[in-house]
Amino acid sequence: MKILIADDHAIVRKGLKQILLEGYPFASVEECSSAEELINKAITGKWDVVITDISMPGRSGLDALQQIHSALPKLPILILSMHPEEQYAIRALKAGASGYCSKDFAEEELVTAIQKILAGKKYITPTLAETLLTQSELNPVLHERLSDREFDVFQLLASGKSVSEIADLLSLGSTTISTYRARILEKMNLKNNTDIIRYALDNKLI
């Protein structure tokens, strides 16, 4: 079995590789550290499963997920993130992910998650399944109006980061981030960063 893992932290990749090889001793596990490298390797290679983080320098893991899924719709892709599932899981599944697993539970859940998505099923927790069942597409919550990149910027603003800090983190210009901020305020009917922080706290998004 060939597995591709993507995370910008070498120590995380090492830990994931160890967990994977305990569950699949004869697997071939390759690593990459950025979304661009992930896209190139995923599309040009032959993989049984791809495991990727969401938060990486430059393009986000969600951007990479969408591009890979578009090119290889049958390739199982598991999102493994430090972000709680209520923040990104639904977006990831809509973008083409086969499952969503928190890094906090990787040691206990990773092999099980892979087994499930290799069998052609989705890997989600019971809590997320209930959320998906009850969420109304006709009346989505305000933050669901945001694009994936707008949501990235929203979360960083909510965590107290400045426009220039976000620009550095996402490898984008400050003007571009300011434009995203303006769109966020407009789409969510908010007035300023204080409103963004309050909304994020009320909805457990940070």
Image (cartoon, rainbow, N blue to C red):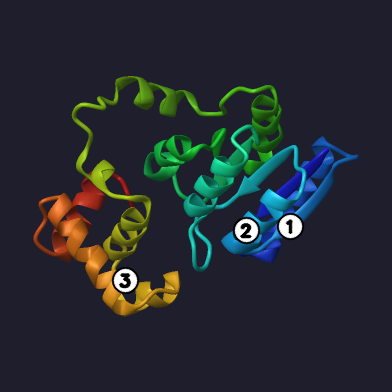
Label 1 CA crowd tier, 10 Å (few <14, some 14–19, many 20+): many
Out of 125 and 122, give the one closest to the viewer: 122
- The residues bearing labels 2 and 1 have C-alpha atoms spaced at a distance of 8 Å
Placement of 85 over or under 193, stated as above or below: above
Residue 118 position, x and y percent, is 70, 28
Whether the residues at callouts 2 and 1 have beta carbons within 8 Å, the answer is: yes
Whether the residues at callouts 1 and 3 have beta carbons within 8 Å, the answer is: no
User: Which residue is tagged 2?
Assistant: 7
The quadrant in which residue 162 appears is bottom left
- The residues bearing labels 1 and 3 have C-alpha atoms spaced at a distance of 30 Å
Q: Which residue occupies 35% across, 78% down?
A: 173
Residue 115 position, x and y percent, is 71, 27
> Residue 31, which numbered label?
1
Label 3 CA crowd tier, 10 Å (few <14, some 14–19, many 20+): some
- The residues bearing labels 2 and 3 have C-alpha atoms spaced at a distance of 22 Å
Labels 1 and 3: the sequence-earlier one: 1
- Residue sitting farthest toward the right: 26
| Quadrant, the N terminus | top right
Residue 106 position, x and y percent, is 63, 42
> Residue 11, which numbered label?
none
Whether the residues at callouts 2 and 3 have beta carbons within 8 Å, the answer is: no
Q: Circle 1 sits in a helix, a strand or a loop, which is it?
A: strand
User: Which residue is tagged 3?
Assistant: 161
Q: Amino acid at mark 2?
A: Asp
Q: Amino acid at mark 1?
A: Glu
Q: Is residue 109 left or right of residue 19?
A: left
Q: Circle 3 sits in a helix, a strand or a loop, which is it?
A: loop
Q: Is residue 71 left or right of residue 170?
A: right
Q: Is residue 12 left or right of residue 79?
A: right
Labels 2 and 1: the sequence-earlier one: 2
Q: Which residue occupies 45% across, 74% down?
A: 171
